[in-house]
Image (cartoon, rainbow, N blue to C red):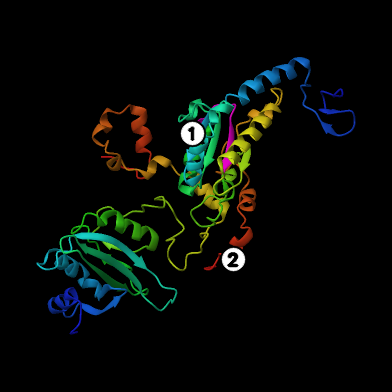
Amino acid sequence: MGLSDPATGFGGGDGTTVSPVSPNWVTTRLDFLTNWARSNSLWPMPFGTACCAIEFMATAASRFDLARFGMERMSFSPRQADVLICAGRLPFKLAPVIRRIWDQMPQPKWSISMGACASSGGIFDNYSMVQGIDTIIPVDVYVPGCPPRPEGLIYGIRLLQKKIMGESITDDMLRDEKLVGPSGLFLPADRVDELSEPFGNSVHQTRST
Amino acid sequence: MTNAPPSVAALRAQFADAVTRHLVSCGDTVVYVERDRAHDVLAWLKDAPGQQFDYLTDVTAVEYRDPERPVEVVWQLRSLGRKADLRLKVELDKGGPLEVRSVYDLWRGADWLEREVYDMFGITFVGHPDLRRILMWETYAEGFPLRKDFPLRGHFSRAEQTRQALAANPEAHYSMEELSIAEAYDELPADMRERLARGERGFLK
């Protein structure tokens, strides 16, 4: 940890970006405590729309027992939730709904995109389906699979816990609310188009165009 | 038509000019009728002794890849008492208006079925009490998704589709009548009344 220049935010002349508030012993110990508490008491807001929700229920049930990781309580109210788990495909008609749920969740909050459909639209590359929920809300962890096995979801949750353990209270960017802007999107329009680009076999599906 | 199925023979006797042709496909009887007589035929099939097709299984439509072929509206009928099925079809020329009379007055179950056909194909059911989109949201502006000239991914770019979807008001998908709290409307708090009235459907009482 080198000394940083508070005026420029750059330290050591090596081009490494350092936060204006330099981490010190107190903040790093406090970070550890906060992150340990947060990562081991994640309350999920289950947003289950399809078959992934069945696997999610299996994950929460006794055999896989999500409670082992501090997720004992499913929070069906977004006001008391920490992590939004989108389990299943998201049609455009549900886009404002998940956006509102995300906006209603208090900080700190994270989101997991569970399964191929939530992450990329999956096989539903058509007129009615959002091509990845990252065009609607920010996503922390993507869990691949169609649907993912409970082990896969648990691995994604463990990854999220690992990610939380690396956070710092001095980094304001982490708690930045990414709201829908005046353009009606929270990402630039060309970024949404780029994220929604067809891939794999789906490029052959435009029969009518 | 000596070996025509019983309902077809009866139909031809009753509506000689309305029945254009019939065929038996995979054991199912299919009758094509004139567009303007379809409602009369369906009303007769529902109530006439010996027919009694009291259950409307489905209303749907078909558009074929061949652009010359007309759009078909299909009524699948079932007589619960007689355990008999009958399929009725009307051909709508693509040049003309895609309109057919609603059968809501015969079978109440036609309500949402006709709304779905309208939503997906843009076929107007004249006389339907509440013909609006049912699967897509009501302000959906890209057209009718199951028509053959509709591209699989829709007309707009993904960014525009996402923008329009995010701009939608989720409460607007539901009318007060569907939520069955229209009677309680006056007792709701003022801010909730204001919020519900802002829905794109607009009017309340």
Is A113 contained in the magenta span? yes
Around disc 1, counting alpha carbons within 10 Å, would you say few (fewer than 14), some (14 to 19), or many (20 or more)?
few
Residue nearest the viewer, comparing B134 with B2: B2
Quadrant of residue B175 within the rendered picture: top left
Please provide percent x and percent y for residue B91. Answer: 31, 74
Residue tagged 1: A61
In the image, are marks 2 and 1 on the same chain?
yes
Q: Nearer the viewer, residue A42 or B103?
A: A42
Q: Which residues are magenta?
A: A104-114
In the displayed structure, would residue B174 be above or below residue B64?
above
**Chain on which label 1 sits:** A
The one nearer the camera, B200 or A119, is: A119
Q: How many marks?
A: 2
Q: Amino acid at mark 1?
A: Ala
Query: Is residue A182 visible in this depiction of the protein?
Result: no
- Mark 2 nearby-residue class (10 Å; few <14, some 14–19, many ≥20): few
Out of B2 and A95, give the one closest to the viewer. B2
Tell me, yes or no, if residue A85 can be seen here: yes
Q: Residue furthest bottom?
A: B2
Subunit of label 2: A
- Residue hosting label 2: A204
Give the quadrant of residue B181: top left
Picture residue at 41% right of the left edge, 50% below the top: B137
Residue A79, position in %: x, y? Answer: 49, 27
- Residue B69 pos. (x, y %): 38, 77
